[in-house]
Amino acid sequence: MNEFNILFYSSPNPMWVFDTCTLQILEVNDASIAAYGYTKKDFLSKTIKDLRPPEDVHLVEEMLSQIRADQTHFREFRHRDSKGRVFYVEIMSYPIIFDGKDARLVTTQNIEEKKAMVGQLELTKAKLNRMLETTSIGFFQVDHNHTITYWNHAAEKMIGYNREYLLGKNMWNVFPEAIDTDFYEQYQQAIREQRNAEFTSYFWPVQKWLSVTIYYVEEGLVIHFRDITESKRYEEKLLEKIEQLKEISYLNSHYIRKPVASLLGLTGLISNSLISADEYKVVAKQIQECSLELDSVVHKVNSRVNDESGYIAYEEIKNFSLNNLVEYVIAEIEKQEKSHAIILKYKEEITCYGDEYSIASALKQLIDNAIKFSPNADKIEVCLEVVRHNAIVSVQDFGVGIDTQTLNRIFLGFNKKSVAKEMGTGLGKVSDAALKHNGNVWVESKPGKGAVFSIRLPMSNIGVYKQVGVTNFSDYQGPGINVKYNNTLRSVVAEWDGFQSLHSIKTGCLKLLNVVTEQSAKYIFNDNTDVIGTWNEAIDWVAAEFFPMLQNAGVTHIAWVYSSSTFARLSADMTIANINTNIVVKTFDDAAKARRWLKQINKSYNPE
C-alpha cells in the first residue's frame, strides 16, 4: 500500500478510485481537487456520473459492462468541474481491489488545449484546401511509390484528368508521355538528391508551357505548376519579329540600295542631259531592269512583313478527326488547283488531340510543294496511317526526286535557322507544327521516284480521355531501346527501336552508359536498324556530351548500323561528324558486317 500511496497522492495528474458496482468515488488525490475545484468531501460524495455533463451521463451507463470488465481502458471523455465548465480529458483506468471492493484506478489528463490545437489545425487544413481548390496554380502530391495522393481543381483544368480518375494511381502509368521529358529528369533528381527543383517545361499532350516547382517532403513530392504558355508564345513571337527585322534590314542594306543607286544614276544622266537621243532607249531598258529588280526586293520585304498574316500559329487545342481535316484541306486545294488529282489513301480512322489549324497549314504546305515539284505528273498521294501509336500523314509527289545535296540542306534546315531561311518559311512551319505535338518531319526520296514528306503526330492518353472519358493509359508508347551485354562480341549491344526524340535518346543513352560501366566494356554494337524518321534534336547532345561520357567510361570502338530511313541516317552522320573524342566509330548498312568488324577488333586487341 505504501507504493500505491506514493504513486497516487504525489501524482501531478488527477487520480481517483471508484467502486465498479456503485460507481461511487472512494478516494481522490490532491491534483484532482486542484483541477476540478471540489473539496475532498465533495468528491467522495459523488459517483463518476456526477463528473460528466448531464448530456453525457448515458455514455457511462452504456459502458457499465466494460467498466466492470477486468481490462485496462484508455478513452477520451468530457468532464465538468465545480464551476460547471466542460472540458475534454483522456482517461486511463485499470481494475484494482480497494478496501476489499472491486474498484478501478483512474488517471486523467486535460486535453482541452490539445483539442483546441487539433481544431485549429483542422480549420487551417480546411482553409488550405479552399485555397488549393480556388487557386489558378496546379497542385498535386505523390508519395515515395509515385502514387498520386492529391490533385487540385486547377490541375484538373490545365491537364484534363479529374482527380477521381487519378488518385491512387502510379504517376508514370498515368503520364507515360512525361517520361521522356525535362519533368521526368527533374522529378527523379529531386527524389535522388532529396532537394527542391524549379524549371520550365513544355508538356506536349496539352501543348502548354508550364513553370514547375518540385518540393521534396517527408511524405514524397509536392508539385505545383503554372500555365505560362501565353507569355512564352509572346516571347517567341517577339524573337521572330526581331529576326524578321534583321532580315528586312539586311535586304534593305544589301539589295534595295543597289537598284536604287542605279536608278538615281541613270535618272541623273537624263536630268543633266548627259545622254544622246540614241542612248535613251538603252537607258530606258536599264531603268526598267533596275525597277524590276527593286520591285522583286520590295516584294520579298512585304512577304516577310506579312508572313504571319494568314497563319494563326496557336489555336484552340481540341479533339478532331484527322481524316476529316485531311479531306477538308484537299477539297480547299482542289478548288484552286485543277492540274493534279489528289489521291487520299486511308488505312484507319484517326482522332487527334491538338492544334487543328497548325496541322492543316502544314499539310497544305506539303501538298502545295508536292504539286509544284510534280510538273510532269497528274497526281499526288496523301496517306494516313497509325504506326506504333503515332499518327503519320505522308504526302508523295511524282517528280524527279530530291538529290542528296538538297536532302542534306532540307535536313539542316530543320536544325539551323540560317539554312532554314534559304529553304523558305514553308517547311519551317511544317516542322514547327510537328514539334508542337512532340512529333517531327522527315523525307524519303530516290532519284526519278519522287519524294515522300511525312509528319509524325504522337497519340496521347489525355487526347483519348478527353474524347471518350476513359483511357487504359496505353495509347502512348515511348520510343524503345534494348541494351544488353554480348559475351561473344565482348560488346554492349544497343538495339534502338521506333521513333526517337531528344529525351528518349538521352534516356536510352544513359541506360547504355550504365551497362557499359557495369561491364567495363570497351566496345559497343549500336544498332539503328529499326529506327524510324529523324532524331535531329539530339545530335548536339550525343556528340558534345554523351560521347565524352563513353570515352571516360573506357569505350574505344563503336560499330554503328544505319537505319534505312534517310533522316535517321543523316542524324547519325551529323552526330559522328561532330564527335571530338578518340573513340573509333565505323558505320555499316549491314548488321552482320558490323558484328564481323567487332570480332576482328576483339582479336586484334584481345588475342587468345
Image (cartoon, rainbow, N blue to C red):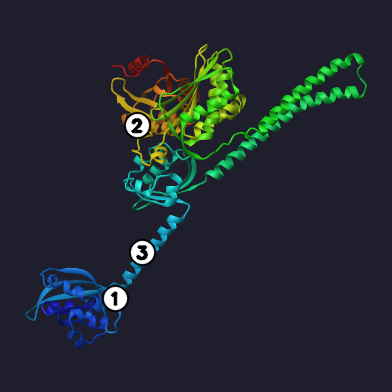
Looking at the image, can residue 412 be seen? Answer: no
Is residue 35 shown to the viewer in this render? Answer: yes
Q: CA distance from mark 1 to mark 3?
A: 19 Å
Vertically, is 225 above or below 530? below
Q: Which mark is residue 422?
A: none
Labelled pair 1, 3 in contact (Cβ < 8 Å): no
Q: Secondary structure at mark 2?
A: helix
Find disc 3 in the rendering and name its residue. Answer: 122
Q: Amino acid at mark 2?
A: Thr
Give me the C-alpha separation between circle 1 and circle 2: 66 Å
Give how far across and how far down residue 396 sits, in percent.
50, 19
- Extreme left residue here? 100
- Local packing at callout 2 (Cα closer than 10 Å; few below 14, some 14-19, many 20+) is some
Between disc 1 and disc 2, the foreground one is: 1
Residue 265 versus residue 105 in the image, above or below: above
Q: Which residue is mark 2?
A: 517
Label 2, label 3: how many angstroms apart (C-alpha)? 52 Å
Q: Does the CB distance between marks 2 and 3 fall below 8 Å?
A: no
Between 222 and 218, which is closer to the camera in this rendering? 222
In this rendering, the label closer to the viewer, 2 or 3: 3
- Mark number for residue 87? 1
Label 3 crowd bin: few (<14), some (14–19), many (20+), radius 10 Å: few
Residue 522 locus on image (x, y percent) = 36, 25
Q: Quadrant location of the N terminus?
A: bottom left
Task: Tell me the residue at 41%/36% (across/down).
Answer: 460
Q: Amino acid at mark 1?
A: Phe
First in residue order: circle 1 vs circle 3: 1
Residue 503 picture quarter: top left
